[in-house]
Image (tube, helix red, strand yellow):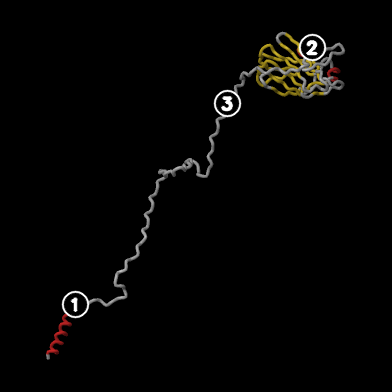
Amino acid sequence: MLLAGLGGFILWAVQERSQSLPVEPPPTDEPAFAQTPPEETPTPAPAPEVSEAVTPAETPDEPEAVTPAFAPADTPEIAPAEPPEEAPPALAEPEVDLPRPSTETEDCSRSGDTTICASSVLAPGHGNSYGPQNLTDGNDSTAWVEGRDGQGLGEFAVVEFGSPRMVRTLTIRNGYNKNADIFAKNSRAKDVEIRFSNGDSLEITLRDEPGSQSMALAQPIETKWIALVIRSVYPGSKYADTAINEISVDTD
């Protein structure tokens, strides 16, 4: 009886115990410990937009090339145009200091304050002389005739003034104007170079005819002397001697 009573008491105690305890939910497949979710990699915040007016910081020791705001980055920089050179004044005073051309065999003649020289002179003959004085005597029966072998290419005559003159016009009487026969027999200058003491020069072509041929300069030239150099000729029918009858200069 005692055992039966003890057993009944134990059974009652167990039932009371089970009723007083909280009911646990049935086990699940989840682990006993809650899983910590994987840490998410933080997304970097977007960089703040930089205003066009803000200039990025320069990298030390690497200066940043500056592109002009008005040109694309790939457009080469164009150097500014140089200002045009000023035109020289029309009547600029030249330096009158170049020595006149001369030769060891030259022949010179003086008239007043003007000296006339020739690089060579044909030897006198038939009662005629052919020196440089004939270039300014105003006489068609006389002429300067060069004395070099051949046609006299490179030979010259010089008119030298006592002081600088402003030359405007040059007049030449080509050939030996004594008469038509003598004119044809002797050579006449064709292309001549005119030189001035300031370094200027010009080329002119003379006509193959007697009489005066005048050449007005494009602008007056201040000079101390004028030289006429023979560059080519009209060959004479008999003589290989080039003649020039007269040279005159219009000066101020």
Total marks in image: 3
- The residue at 15%/82% (across/down) is 13
Q: Is 11 left or right of 43, judged from the image as shown?
A: left
The vertical placement of 103 against 43, above or below, is: above
- Of the numbered discs 1 and 3, the one sitting upstream in the chain is 1
Q: Between 108 and 223, which is closer to the camera in this rendering?
A: 108
- Of the numbered discs 2 and 3, the one sitting upstream in the chain is 3
Q: Where does the N terminus fall, quadrant-wise?
A: bottom left
Q: Position of residue 236 (x, y in %)?
A: 84, 22
Q: Amino acid at mark 3?
A: Glu
Residue identified by numbered label 3: 86
Check whether the beta carbons of the residues at disc 2 and disc 3 lie within 8 A of each other: no
Mark pair 1, 3: CA separation:
117 Å
Residue identified by numbered label 2: 139
Q: Between 10 and 81, which is closer to the camera in this rendering?
A: 10
Q: Position of residue 125 (x, y in %)?
A: 86, 13
Between circles 1 and 3, the one closer to the viewer is 1
Between circles 2 and 3, the one closer to the viewer is 3
The vertical placement of 213 against 40, above or below, is: above
- The residue at 22%/77% (across/down) is 23
Q: Is 22 left or right of 47, judged from the image as shown?
A: left
Secondary structure of residue under mark 3: loop
Residue identified by numbered label 1: 21
